[in-house]
Amino acid sequence: MALLCFTIQITHYLHKKHPPSPPPTRAIPSSSSLAAMPGGPAMDDANADHVVDRAASPLDSGEPLSKNALKKLEKMKKQAEVKEEARRKAEAEASARKPSAKVQAEHEEQEIDPTQYTRNRLQVLAEVKAKGINPYPHKFHTTMRLPEFVKTYSKLDAAQRLEDKIVSVAGRILSIRSSSTSLHFYDLHGDGVKIQVFAELRCSGLNETEYGKLHAGIKRGDIVGIEGFPGKSKTGELSIFPSSIEVLSYCLHMLPKGQASAANAAGKSQAWRPGVPRNLDRYILKDQETRYRQRYLDLMINPEVREVFSTRAQIIRYVRRFLDERGFLEVETPMMNMIPGGASARPFVTHHNELNMDLYMRIAPELFLKKLVVGGLDRVYEIGKQFRNEGLDLTHNPEFTMCEFYWAYADYNDLMKVTEELVSGMVKEITGGYKILCHSNGRDQPPIEIDFTPPFRRIPMIEGLEETSNGQIKLPNDLESEETNKYLQDACERFDVKCPPPHTTSRLLDKLVGHFVEETCVNPAFIMHHPKIMSPLAKWHRSIPGITERFELFVNKHEVCNAYTELNDPVIQRERFADQVKDKEKGNDEAMQIDETFCTALEYGLPPTAGWGMGIDRLTMMLTDSQNIKEVLLFPAMKPNEDIVVTSAKPLVTAG
């Protein structure tokens, strides 16, 4: 523009200094006549004047210019160049300040109140429905899932397009970008992977108005079905080039925004894997309350969460395969019982209307499974939910998943060998090695290493307690005496170990072991040889008086497994149950009741049997670097949300 002005200025200057002579033989056509000529240029007034003046300029006639005229021309030329450079610079700065289509769209979305955003979307849908159109199709036929699309076409070259290969896929839109009104880009997510949608006007089969209306109606979170051909962009991004796009379901709420890290991108080499630390700070949706209460949103926005629950599923599959390969039979036992048995825990109570009686949600399947061994099912197991009416904390949830198995003609020594094989083999298969890293001391501290290489350390409980307390605790020989109970109460007070009442010997001893011994069990370790008063269902030790053949596997200072040689003497079992009743009368609401149906089953003969139980949730926590059990439960128990107000089902918008 500045150069054009410069040319015009020169022409006017020369015209002034050297009046034009008349055209020699032909007339120069005017701008209007040029524009009217077939194929002639459409010219504005400024360009037309430029053509006329240039035709009459002395520069064309070859007349010599004076030195002053040449100096002025040179000066005007430099001034024009400076102006042109300033104009270009201003345009570049303006272009840099101007937001991209994506940024502009997000800015406009941010300016809308979330409630108004939902109302707007509902209003649009209501208008569509008012026209007799169903905005929620019943079916969309896909020819392949997104992981299959990635696997099939990921090796294409950059800019390669398979235009003769038509496929149809579906997924959720989580990112929208626009290069122009005729070119839009979307990130399509599904089944843990992502591909790009490269939407061009020329491939859509729509006119410009239809194309613009379609893409203006697609928002983040919408589920779409796409038909088109596969290929890659010039930058090598795996894409589908759509010939048609159909919105299958609408996201009526604004999704959380944020910049996902590279490790969150599906299919990237730096993506998280089991056994290595997680960084929750890089999550787009960070608020824990929202993540746990709206797990669907957490899974949608934070792709890494999907891998956590995939790891949980891998653990369960491994345990099931391990036991199936060794001849164990998977069974199911009742969830509701007339007597809560199989563990020391406070039960949930429910009511059966038809029978008009209270029932207890099961706290363990142990007694039922041992009845099956009595019946001749020598190797049985169950993976399922247990319910214990206890507190909520970082490692406890009222309902949790356990695997229990019972193995006829085996004892606790066999169980320790199998436990080492199962747990270490699982860690190696899922993580690729025996060592894992996790933030056991908090995410503000460096992660620690846990080594699952077998064999695991073995720690006799009483000897371990005396050793880890540096000899400051020396238990009396008779662990069931009042003297021992008084000694343990004094020890808890001396070492500031909290033990809520009732102060039974088993509870006091358990708290002291937790304070001294369990704290040393970072790598897997068996704490073994529990006293009889702590193990009402375990068989007495064959050579150590007052002790049982029992062990617990501790990893990262938390119990993972509990196992023992099963008590199969019905007379002694009744005596143990009676001792538990005495504890209950003292206020221990976690003590067991007498289960006569189980004792009767023992009277028919339970073979020498080993029993084992492992918590799935805590093991998942370790392999996924989760410090809160809610991280590994899809829908954890939560306190009521006081912010939620129940209102009548009044529609937000109405059609028409």
Image (cartoon, rainbow, N blue to C red):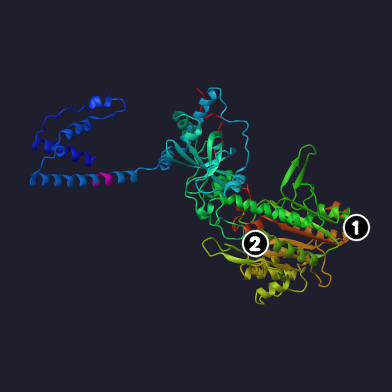
Q: Is residue 586 visible?
A: no
Instruction: Please give the residue where the numbered disc 1 appears in the rendered image.
Output: 605
Q: Amino acid at mark 2?
A: Gly
- Helix, strand or loop at disc 2? loop
Q: Quadrant of residue 538?
A: bottom right
Q: Position of residue 580 (x, y in %)?
A: 78, 59
Q: Residue furthest right?
A: 604
Q: Which residues are magenta?
A: 85-90
- Of residue 591 and residue 453, the one placed in the foreground of this image is 453
Q: Is residue 48 visible?
A: yes
Instruction: Please give the residue where the numbered disc 2 appears in the rendered image.
Output: 432
Query: Does 514 lie within the magenta span?
Result: no
**Which of marks 1 and 2 precedes in the sequence?**
2
- Of residue 284 and residue 597, the one placed in the foreground of this image is 284
Against 584, residue 292 (above or below) is above
Q: Residues within 10 Å of mark 1 (few under 14, many from 20)?
A: some
- Of residue 221 and residue 271, the one placed in the foreground of this image is 271
- Helix, strand or loop at disc 1? loop
Query: Does 89 lie within the magenta span?
Result: yes
- Of residue 262 and residue 106, the one placed in the foreground of this image is 262
